[in-house]
Amino acid sequence: ATGRGRAEYFSEALAAGIAQGHQLESELRDAIRDDQFMLVFQPQVCASDGTIVAAEALVRWRHPRDGFRLPGSFIQRAEETGLIVEIGEWVVREVAATIARWGRIGIEQRLAINVSPRQIDHVTFFEQLRAEMRAANAPARLLELEISESLAMRCSESVIDAIRQLRVDGATIAIDDYGTAASSLPRLRRLPIDRIKLDRSLIEHVVEDAQARAVAQAVIGLAHGLGCEAVGEGIETRAQADVLRVIGCDVIQGYAIAEPMAEEAFIAWARGVTPLGEDTRASA
Ligand code: C2E
Ligand code: MG
Ligand code: MG
Ligand code: MG
């Protein structure tokens, strides 16, 4: 894997790494079989008045030994082994059911899901997505698909067609982690998208660094120029939220607003937020 004409000693560390990878893979298979995944929800709010506009669904693994595990510790292995397809199918099913369940209790909230390369390239992904939404009686307009910038730059024409069809149904498309990959602007212009999510690395220094602020503002201008909404992610402080509002960001998401929450906590949170900053939550 490191190239031809090279020899490498088989080391203890290498062996341990391989064994760990195999163990993770077998634990992931158990997790799929035993239903150990759950979703948490992080609100996205309007930058100017704080009203909730959507939520992002993020997967968590209730590991029998380690407790909650974050996607950073298993999504990559799930990608490599192809298990992401099954995990992704579970996420799609769960999101469709959640949209329908919330609809019945009067929460009309758009829910965003994340998709990885192996998933979106899988022939049946879009079919399954539409079938699950239909079966759950969940309207497509309450679904958003988040596709990372790097993935968006290399989707095939057939995937782009499927995305286009999904938008015709009413779903929205967001480019995730924008600003982290080398992306082609002419290509971005031709993609059927609704929102651009500024990666946390674009947000991090906007308060103290004028150049960081200029870059964020330029990306927001780009989003608006393409007819998209700009969403800032990873907003950790009030000061960052204020700067983003001032430079024209439409929607913000991050720990400063709320951390990802289990369903019940999310519903309570969403009900506590009223328009124009009349915040009935205990603290913001
Ligand atoms: P992402 O889509 O960019 O999601 C945002 C990540 O930033 C989440 O991490 C979220 O918990 C975290 N975050 C939110 N606000 C803040 C903040 O203010 N500060 C900081 N430092 N972080 C914040 P999480 O949940 O660990 O997910 C990591 C990544 O894993 C996601 O990045 C996404 O790419 C992937 N992922 C999550 N759920 C799924 C899923 O269901 N399917 C697939 N394929 N990928 C997923
Ligand atoms: Mg995301
Ligand atoms: Mg993101
Ligand atoms: Mg990110």
Image (cartoon, grey):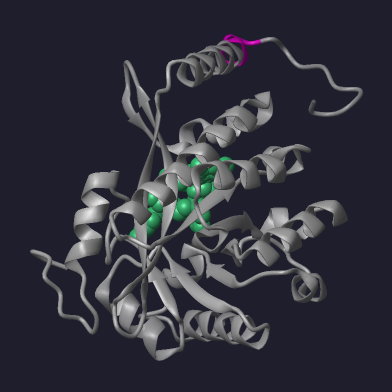
Looking at the image, which residue sits at the far right?
Answer: 5
Q: Is residue 65 above or below residue 230?
A: above
Q: Position of residue 152 (x, y in %)?
A: 72, 58
Residue 277 in the image: state x and y as whole percent: 20, 81
Horizontal and vertical percent position of residue 5:
91, 22
Judged left or right of residue 1, residue 232 is left
Horizontal side of residue 39 vs 26, given as left or right: left
Q: Does the image show residue 250?
A: yes
Image vertical order of residue 5 relative to residue 241, above or below:
above
Residue shown at the point (52%, 57%) measured from the top left: 139
Quarter of the rendering containing residue 208: bottom left
x%, y% of residue 131?
63, 42
Dominant secondary structure of the magenta stretch? Answer: helix
Residue 173 visible to an observer of this rendering: no
Question: Exactly how many numbered labels are in the figure?
Answer: 0
Q: Image quadrant of residue 218?
A: bottom right
Q: Quadrant of the N terminus?
A: top right
Q: Which residue is drawn at 82% across and 17% down?
A: 7
Q: Residue at x 76, y 16 (%)?
A: 8
Residue 55 is left or right of residue 67, and the answer is: right
67 within the magenta span = no
Q: Residue at x 59, y 80 (%)?
A: 219
Outermost left residue: 282
**Quadrant that contains the C terminus:** bottom left
259 left or right, relative to 73? left
State the extent of the magenta-drawn residues as a range: 11-15
In the rendered view, tell whether residue 64 sits above or below residue 154.
Answer: above
Does 120 sit above or below residue 30?
below
